[in-house]
Amino acid sequence: MMEDGHRWLEREQVAPDYRSFVCAIEARYRGQNFEVRVLMEPPQRDGLSTFLERFHDCHRREHGYAIDSRPIEIVNCRVQARGRLAKAEMPRLETGGTTGQAVVGERAVYFGAGHGWCPTKISARERLPVGVPFSGPAIIVEMSSTTVVLPEQTANIDPGGNLIIDIAPVRGAGA
């Protein structure tokens, strides 16, 4: 199974140093209806004695008892092949424009008894400049969502394109 895993990871172009395997044996005492998953190192000479010891420990931990003299049935042997890949480079957005250029409309929006109806700019998210903070109230629209920036909150677009909203109210110097 490990050889199959190596071949698969090779086809996926995972370098040997970035490959790892999780080996597990699912077993039970003869006559039981449930298995215990025992994590194992890749096959070794002393594998059987290590497995028996770990099985009893796992059974004791999961079910509160172990019966060292009872026969054990191996139900499944599993190998999980894992490949670690380099993190994809995220494109950085270009800085440019103004928050005013992103505004596509304005309307009165009700923000509760504390603020009432407020004139609220509506901005197209794709037009918002990177790294330029703007204050709420604001509504940011895009194809798949609408985001509300409440009064006393600030927001900006980071270089990765994330909309970051500071939810802490903006306070004056004397507050």
Image (cartoon, grey):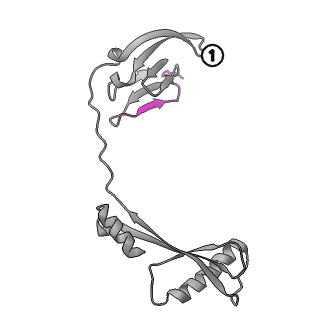
Q: Which residue is depicted at the point 72% across and 80% down?
A: 31
Location of residue 71 with respect to 84 vertically, above or below: below
Q: Which residue is mark 1?
A: 112
Q: Name which quarter of the figure residue 93 lies in.
A: top left
Closer to the camera in the image, 120 or 175: 120
Q: Which residue is depicted at the point 67% across and 74% down?
A: 61
Location of residue 106 with respect to 32 vertically, above or below: above
The answer to whether residue 153 is visible is no
Q: Position of residue 150 (x, y in %)?
A: 53, 21
How many labels were placed on the picture?
1
Q: Is residue 165 magenta?
A: yes
Location of residue 171 with respect to 50 vertically, above or below: above
Q: Which residue is depicted at the point 47% across and 27% down?
A: 145
Closer to the camera in the image, 115 or 35: 35
Q: Which residue is depicted at the point 66% across and 78% down?
A: 28
Q: Position of residue 79 (x, y in %)?
A: 47, 71
Write down the region rendered in magenta.
Answer: 161-175
Which type of secondary structure does the marked residue at label 1 adopt? loop
Q: Quadrant of the C terminus?
A: top right
Tell me which secondary structure the magenta stretch mostly adopts: loop
Q: Quadrant of the N terminus?
A: bottom left
Closer to the camera in the image, 116 or 21: 21
Left-right relation of 141 to 132: right
Q: Position of residue 100 (x, y in %)?
A: 35, 14
Q: Amino acid at mark 1?
A: Gly
Closer to the camera in the image, 121 or 32: 32
Q: Is residue 62 magenta?
A: no
The answer to whether residue 117 is visible is yes
Location of residue 125 with respect to 116 vertically, above or below: below
Mark 1 crowdedness (10 Å alpha carbons): few <14, some 14-19, many ≥20: few
Q: Name which quarter of the figure residue 14 lies in.
A: bottom left
Q: Position of residue 129 (x, y in %)?
A: 32, 25
